[in-house]
Image (cartoon, rainbow, N blue to C red):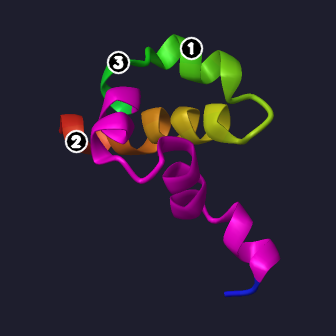
Amino acid sequence: MEEPDRIRNPKVVVEKLTGGRMEREQQCWEETSLKLLRERGVHTGLTAYIHEIEERLIPIISE
């Protein structure tokens, strides 16, 4: 993978943000509210991703 693609890879970004510590990564997804993620994720695509999951995946799981 070329460097520009690598630095945009979500797995690489998460590793850099958490220092590769699984407990830090776990803390992020267990303790951060969806409301906060939606607010902060507008410019990164996270808000759109959460919305898509809610629209498409939740109805499938709920059946």
- Between tags 1 and 2, which lies in front? 1
> Badge 2 is on which residue?
61
Image x and y of residue 8, in percent: 71, 62
- Between tags 1 and 3, which lies in front? 3
Q: Quadrant of residue 7 in the image?
A: bottom right
Q: Measuring 74% from the left and 40% from the top, which residue is drawn there?
A: 44
Which mark is first along the chain, 3 or 1?
3
Q: Measuring 30% from the left and 25% from the top, which residue is drawn there?
A: 30
CA separation in Å, label 1 and label 2: 24 Å
Question: Which residue is at the front of the view, 30 or 55?
Answer: 30
Magenta residues span 3-28
> Badge 1 is on which residue?
36
Within the magenta stretch, is there residue 22?
Answer: yes
> Badge 3 is on which residue?
31
CA separation in Å, label 1 and label 3: 10 Å
Which mark is first along the chain, 2 or 1?
1
Query: Is 50 on the left-hand or right-hand side of 31?
Result: right
Q: Amino acid at mark 3?
A: Glu
Q: Measuring 30% from the left and 47% from the top, which residue is drawn there?
A: 22
